[in-house]
Image (tube, rainbow, N blue to C red):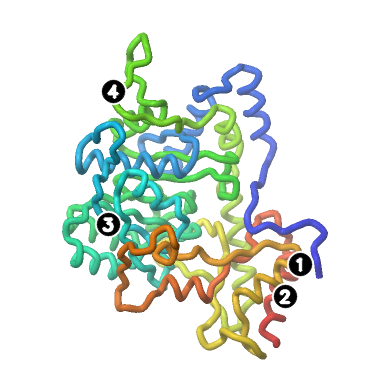
Amino acid sequence: MRFEKRVWLASPTMHGDELRYMQEAYETNWMSTVGKNIDEVERQVAEKVGVKYAVALSAGTAALHLATRLAGVRLFGVPKAGEGSLHGQKVFCSDMTFAATLNPVAYENGEAVFIDSERDTWNMDPVALEKAFEIYPDVKLVVLVHLYGTPAKVDEIRAICKRHDALLIEDAAESFGASYKGVQTGSFGDFNAISFNGNKIITGSSGGMYLTDSKEDADRVRKWSTQSREPAPWYQHEEIGYNYRMSNVIAGVVRGQLPHLEEHIAQKRAIYERYKAGLAGLPVQMNPYDAANSVPNFWLSCMIIDENAIGEGRGKATPAKILESISAMNAEGRPIWKPMHMQPLYAGHAFVTASGDDVGADIFARGLCLPSDNKMTPDQQEAIIATIRECFEG
């Protein structure tokens, strides 16, 4: 079977109000980086996540960069022009993630040390993190991501950070709307970021947000994001700044999307549950989460093939074979994020595992992301499930 219209991994789902708010920005001529749309999305997202302040930025990466710079300034003071705020210091980072999680560490002249994943959630392993502090006791910053919208073991990670007097950056780019022990992700770190990229559960086509309970931090991020202009009648600059503010037009898209967050999560969860039921009996597992403590936003549904079922022949398959079969249907799947310690860009950086096993590399080798677009029909998903089953039939 081949679909006439492509089924995407995850694409924007628009509702109509997005256009209305963009039109409002146009008609009122508030096309730049101030306006009612920005004010509203900052207010609504802060209220949803449960923080006091939100700063709308041009991308989730921008939010992570300013979070990282803010952490460096907090730890080591304001750098001179042209210098990064981390001054070559090591930073513990989630290993299995998109590069945007930790590239800001390099922007700020830090050195990422990669912490392996654990199998319960595929996120940073607290045991490996504790081991990393034993090896590098002077590290004072940790960057944690909630992979594919699944909350990490937040309490354990935060407790370890507290014991070692380290600050925590929470990358909730993929997990907006997810919760851990009844509290929204994006509120647990000393510095927090979310994304509104085109494929996220709520999109602005681009955009992101810095989240905090600190007015001082919010004001500083807001200033940095507008080129660090000082309150003077001329353009006065006393520290490095960036052109990172969200436009009022993009904010209009986000504003139109926000009322549909819970609807999108419900749709994504239904997709996950259909895969789980439809693939039952095969030697595969869905991407796991801690049901007792967390509620993911189910942004992407992923699966991992059992170790003894990798290969050719009846009852076996490979991620490449499944992805090729899905692609032949005109549907999009993808490999799991390639762990950062395996990326050529970061060759030579330290990598810490809990027991010597490379969990992230194993998940990468045996896992894949399934089509998870919330416009995919149940019939289309059933056809994809049938194709996956055929892959194991030899």
Where disc 3 sits, the SS reads: helix
Per the image, the residue denoted by label 4 is 238
- Labelled disc at residue 158: 3
| Mark 1 or 3, nearer chain start | 3
Q: Measured from the top left, where is residue 181 in percent x and y?
A: 37, 58
Residue furthest to the bottom:
314
Q: Between residue 36 and residue 262, name the one nearer to us.
A: 36
Q: Marks 1 and 2, Cα distance to the nearest angstrom?
A: 9 Å
In-image side of 125 versus 330 (left or right): left
The residue carrying pointer 1 sits among few (fewer than 14), some (14 to 19) or many (20 or more) residues within 10 Å by Cα, namely many
- Labelled disc at residue 248: none
In-image side of 1 versus 154 (left or right): right
Task: Relative to 182, say whether 253 is above or below.
Answer: above
Task: Relative to 301, say whether 266 is above or below.
Answer: above
User: Which one is closest to the eye, mark 3 or mark 2?
Assistant: 2
Marks 3 & 2, CB-CB < 8 Å contact: no
Marks 3 & 4, CB-CB < 8 Å contact: no
Residue at 69%, 71% in the rendered image: 324
User: Which one is closest to the eye, mark 4 or mark 2?
Assistant: 4
Q: Marks 4 and 1, Cα distance to the nearest angstrom?
A: 56 Å
Per the image, the residue denoted by label 1 is 329
| Mark 4 or 2, nearer chain start | 4
Residue at 32%, 44% in the rendered image: 108
Q: Let me know if residue 43 appears in the view.
A: no
Per the image, the residue denoted by label 2 is 387
Where disc 1 sits, the SS reads: loop
Amino acid at dot 4: Glu
Q: Measured from the top left, where is residue 169 in percent x and y?
A: 33, 49
